[in-house]
Amino acid sequence: MKRTIALLVILLWSGLWDRAAAEVIEDVQFPTNTVPRTGNAEPIELKARLHLPDNAKYPLSAVIITPSSGGVRTVREIHYAAALAAEGIAALVIDSFASRGIVNSVHDQRLLTRWQSGNDAIAGLRWLSRDERFKPERIAVMGVSKGGIVALDTALEVRRRWMRASNVSFSAHVAISPGCQWINRSTITTGAPILFMLAELDDMTPVQPCVTRARHLRETGNANIEVKIYEGAHHAWEALGAKPHFDPWAENYSRCQVWIEDDGTLVTANEGTAIPRRQWYEWAKRTCVKLGAHCCGGTPELKQRATRDIVAFLRKHGF
């Protein structure tokens, strides 16, 4: 496997982080996790970037960062990776979009599904676990929006079974502004700690369904559930600005309420009506998807606080 290694010194200023940090970045590739007779049956060579602390003392704890619908962005995924490396924690940023020749899925969620992203995360977990530089028992997963959904999905036992991944598991999950409206009915998790990081004013992935989801996961037996709600924040607060941006063409699933049964069947949460699995997108566009959502407009103080909360959560659980 070819690796391109570059030593970069990144100064994270304007209040986004509090000290200069040197990191080593490796460009790496590995195959995604494939599951026969599913939407991820064909092998894909994944492109990823591994952020390592300079002068690292191995073995390291690590975090896999899976992208939001906006793709891998410097202000978001790369920011978190650099911040983790500054704290002595490795970060593997998986570019699920570039690996498939696409840019983002903000305006069409069919371009990259949560199933594909989830299998990419599992592939990253397996890849890191085989590398002696990392502690296989201290690998977490995190992401924003679509990436946050992946962080939650990979904690579920039913999803791990679907992905043929019952022999591996993440030791922590950080879900930033995940969508909690289209979810598995099952709430049985691996028991690994989960941090929900939610934006108070989010009109794309609203707070309340995630608060309810967190409560159900806790009631089912996972006592390691934390919820943080950031006042005044909008979706994708990592992008700074004087005010949030409105995208009139963004697909907004906030009105969708769907259960995913253990056999993969889709049903409406309110009526219990079956949704044709192969026509899920057409059904959603017809019944509950609307166009338009606000994002961004975060402040340096909010971004710094959220970043510190992630590090504190990971430290609390042995990273």
Image (cartoon, grey):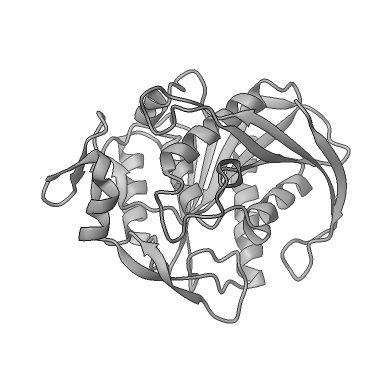
Q: Position of residue 143 (x, y in %)?
A: 54, 48
**Residue 62 in sight from this viewpoint:** yes
Which of the pair 160/313 is nearer the observer? 160
Q: Which quarter of the figure has residue 307?
A: bottom right
User: Residue lying farthest front?
Assistant: 101
Residue 319 in sight here: no
Q: Residue 294's spot in the image, x, y percent?
A: 45, 72
The residue at the far top in this view is 167
Q: Quadrant of residue 85?
A: top right
- Closest to the observer: 224 or 173? 173
* Residue at x 44% of width, y 34% of height: 155
Judge whether 71 appears above or below 216 on screen. Answer: below
User: Going by the image, does 75 lie left or right of 166?
Assistant: right
**Position of 107 compared to 180: left or right?**
right
x and y, in percent, of residue 70 in the image = 54, 58
Q: Residue at x 74, y 68 (%)?
A: 15
Residue 242, placed above or below residue 317: below
Could you tell me which quadrant the N terminus lies in? top right
Question: Horizontal placement of 314 versus 222: left or right?
Answer: right
Q: Residue at x 14, y 52 (%)?
A: 270
Q: State the residue at coordinates (43%, 24%).
A: 35
Rendered-image quadrant of the C terminus: top right
Residue 269 vertical placement versus 261 (above, below): below
| Relative depth, front residue between 29 and 158 | 29
Residue 141 lies, in percent from the top left, at: 56, 39
- Location of residue 47 by image quarter: top right
